[in-house]
Image (spheres, rainbow, N blue to C red):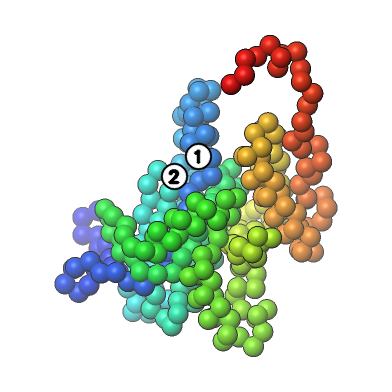
Amino acid sequence: MVGEMRPRNPYLDEAGQPQLRRSVVVFVDILGYQGMTRRAIRSGDGQGFLRVLRETFSRAFAHLKITEGLWAGEPAPWTVKTFSDNIAIGYPILHRAGEAELAVITRRLGEFQLEMTLGGFFIRGAVAVGDLYMDDQMVFGPALLDAYDAEQRLARDPRIVLTESAMQALRDELKRYPEAGTSWHHDAILCDADAQHFVNYLDGVVAYKREMGYSDRDAMARHREIITKRLTEFASDPPRWVKYVWAAGYHNCFCEKSPDFGDDLRVDISDIKVRPARLSAESRNKHDV
């Protein structure tokens, strides 16, 4: 629009020159995006898949759009870059060790991940803290490499993990609270069985109820339905199937810890297990690969 003012890129100095800034950095992608795209195109439903993806992403991405700073007078707080199924976010740190920025971005990520998951798109990613530069054409800096590496090696399942650099900022914040249970991290971040901390996106079902019109039980039922569908779909593909076993475990754990969600909302994987079978006549007639 003619005359519309774009927020100034926080990664440019007053002279318009690029500068590395200590930031909270996010790298996320859609789990299984290439496979879903290929299957939709092969089945002749590429147009329908595109429409659902576009509608879901538009709703979810709204949670990542922020134009105001934490306090009045601050510049636009972060820069977001999307490419294919990937999203990179840079949030320059202006306050202490970055705990305020980490709190805001974690909440927004949880809202984004919940919206995408309820639309059928599971998210994997990582959050790091360190130096970064971003503009419309490029993303550069060690914090991006940290987040990307963690997304590839540590996230593994449909979860957004915190790297060690992000965890250090979180620990610094916890020192300011007399009890850990009184901090924002208490509900927003969970520690997994492998000691990786990740964004507790299901914590947003109450806010989702308020903002999007779903009841919290409807949201959890939808979450269970999507996980069950994926477990069934990938029952013959153990490397992918196990990722949704993780999602089922997370869903059930959340139900156990929430008095509003009973056993009727749990994911039952007893009938959706990967089971070995005896050698069949069809198998014997196939050549070894």
Query: Label 1 belongs to which residue?
Result: 33
Q: Can you see residue 215?
A: yes
The answer to whether 116 is drawn above or below residue 180 in the figure is above
Residue 163 drawn at (x, y percent): 51, 65
Instruction: Name the quadrant of the C terminus.
Output: top right
| Residue drawn at the location 52% of the way across and 53% of the way down | 153
Q: Which residue is nearer to you in this view: 263 or 18? A: 18
Residue 75 drawn at (x, y percent): 32, 73
The answer to whether 8 is drawn above or below residue 174 in the figure is above
Q: How far apart are the two marked residues, 1 and 2, measured between alpha carbons?
A: 7 Å
Secondary structure category for the residue under label 1: helix
Q: Which residue is nearer to you in this view: 271 or 204? A: 271
Horizontal side of residue 105 vs 284, given as left or right: left
| Residue drawn at the location 52% of the way across and 28% of the way down | 40
Amino acid found under the numbered disc labelled 2:
Asp
Horizontal side of residue 189 vs 20, given as left or right: right
The answer to whether 170 is drawn above or below residue 136 in the figure is below
The answer to whether 182 is drawn above or below residue 35 in the figure is below
Amino acid found under the numbered disc labelled 1:
Tyr
Secondary structure category for the residue under label 2: loop
Q: Which residue is nearer to you in this view: 66 or 151? A: 151
Horizontal side of residue 242 vs 78, given as left or right: right
Q: Residue furthest left?
A: 15
Residue 224 drawn at (x, y percent): 71, 46
| Residue drawn at the location 26% of the way across and 53% of the way down | 137
Query: Label 2 belongs to which residue?
Result: 85
| Residue drawn at the location 65% of the way across and 60% of the way down | 194
Mark 1 and mark 2 residues within 8 Å of each other at the beta carbon: yes
